[in-house]
Amino acid sequence: MCRVPLLIPVVVLLMLFAIPAATAQTGIEQRCAELGSACVCSETLNSPTYTNNGASWKPATNVSTKACSSELPGYPIVRNSPVSGTNSADNLLSKLPAGNGVQYALWGGDNNTGIFFIGNGAAASHDCGPGFERCEFRWYLYKSTNFQTTNSGFGGLCSGDKNAEVSYESGADSIINPGSQPLGDGMSMYNFVSAGWTPAVDCCYSGPRATGDEWISGDSQKGKWWRFSHVVRNPAGGTGAGKLHIEVYAKNVTDNAPEVKIIDLEGQGQPGWNSPYNTIIPPGRVKTIAVNAYREGNCPGFEAYSHFMVAHWATDAGQRIGAAYEIEGSGSTPPPPPTYSSFYPSFSPYSSFSPYSSFSPSTPPPPPPASTKFSLNDRVQVINGTLNVRSTPSTSGTLLGSQPIGALGTVVGGPTASGGFNWWNINFDSGADGWSVEDNLQKVVPAPTPPPAGDTTPPPAPGTPSITFQTTGATAATFSITWSQSIDQPSNTAVPSYEYSAGFNDGSGAQSGTVSTNSMTLSMPYHSTGTAQTGFFCVKAKDAAGNLSIDQSCTALSVPAKPATSLFGDLNADGSVNALDLQLEVNVILGTETNTTIKARADLNGDGAANAVDLQMLVNKVLGL
């Protein structure tokens, strides 16, 4: 997609402060440990060497205890050529804050091009999946001083530069570009036009941004370490307060500049893109966001990465991951910088305009609403890790002690928002009392009084399951399963849920779960022998009172053999990748190809959909790039 450059001034406010010394972290970073279960995965990327399984890579040392999984479990990186750690290229470590604990940064070599992802898309459950209304993806990026700023689209000596990629449960991915056109157009986000978007509008040469948001150009990122944070709110999308909201924040860590917001779906895109992005509904729930460092052509310079982390929360209450202590020391999130009156210049690619505009500080935005997680006198319990207790609501407050998992206490003060955390004053039943962050605390709700004796009659068993084979994937076969409803008596209503179980007849591959409808999609991993095997699928009805049907309904399940590993891009399995495969890829994208095996092979990047991204990958393969 072509990008037209804009010259926009960037306001940089320099703040100097001392950064306490931090030590190297093995496994997960300290902030992940503090977040407990809210931390999904953490990769310090502080390893000199990496091991691979095909195109998937993971650190050989400083291996995470909460590993991210990009395409294979435990492998956070996808790269079509080797990756390693560097401690000398472009003197990049000298441009980190003093006292940092980084010995190596991940890179793909000088003049890197091709596929380069860091993410958690292959996790067993989606980072922004059901039950989580806020998720964040944070990493540190360094671009060398000779990094080739590119056209955001394809074509030219060096092109296709990316920053991140947003994946959804259905529909094509959205792309976040780095604002690296030769004159610097600021970051942009686009591709809201695939089937399922409501409305199907697209953005953007620049933006979208809300009033007061900042631009960062491609050249401003050279020779600097930047912290990027991508925040997703209401990932399922909707209307009103439930609308999808994606925000991108950036901080120049090398110069310790204030963090600024550079993308906001609440805003508008430029030039000429004024569609209502704050009302769009995605075709499927947001799954995850990954680093996308793709470039193509003859591209001088390199990008390097450190401290990638994913977190999610059940509520959308302003939570943030914040800084990596191992890089920025105390890690406390700085207060919001003053906002500036924004402008969007009228623009025509055939006319010139002045890139300078007057702006003046305005009143800083109000702090986020106070946390409502607890109330005074609530009973609370420590649920993850060891919880620090401090004298004041700040990470710099005197450490009075800590409380273990299971410790109980009573809320006697708070909340206070400080340093990116919500703090509560807790009177614990034993040990140290004081201020603690809310992330590792949960409210203790007294057990409800048992209801009077009521319905104790089990519902009838549901109908015999009907199983339809769907597709074979790299690791599992997929089946569509339906059964007739179980009608509970005496209410004469359908039961609200069903419990299912599945597995192979030899006892392996067992899985179970609960669904709220009389249909589901089952992903059944192939048998450990790789051969075709017979298994089973059984289902029981569960009524509103919790009674399970005495009998279960079962059907045989025929799981095919694990498909042989085929040549990447060889859609017709003829042993070579050529124009015939390109035509098949186009047919799949246009919807004229019906062969399920070919359709599965056409999804080259494994994001669940065959689209222009997969076509470009196949073109590169055919051309030998």
Image (tube, rainbow, N blue to C red):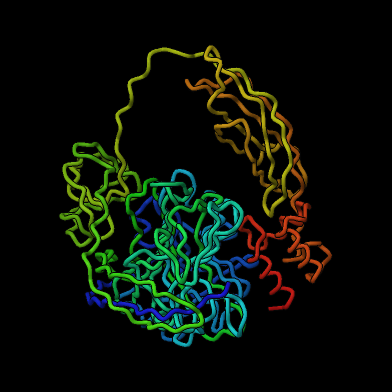
Residue drawn 62% across the image and 24% down it: 485
Percent of width and height locating residue 68: 50, 59
Give the residue displayed 69% in from the left and 29% down from the top: 465
Quadrant of the drawing holding the N terminus: bottom right
Farthest-out residue, right: 574
Locate residue 89 relative to residue 52 in the image: left or right: left
**Image quadrant containing the C terminus:** bottom right
On the question of residue 206 being in view, the answer is yes
Picture residue at 27% right of the left edge, 68% below the top = 339
Q: Position of residue 608 (x, y in %)?
A: 63, 55
Left or right: residue 142 compared with residue 516: left
**Camera-nearest residue between 106 and 491:** 491
**Which percent across, then down, holds residue 365?**
25, 61
Q: In the image, is residue 45 above or below residue 427?
A: below
In this rendering, the answer to whether 375 lies above or below 387 is above
In the rendered image, which quarter is residue 493 located in? top right
Name the residue nearer the viewer: 402 or 425: 425
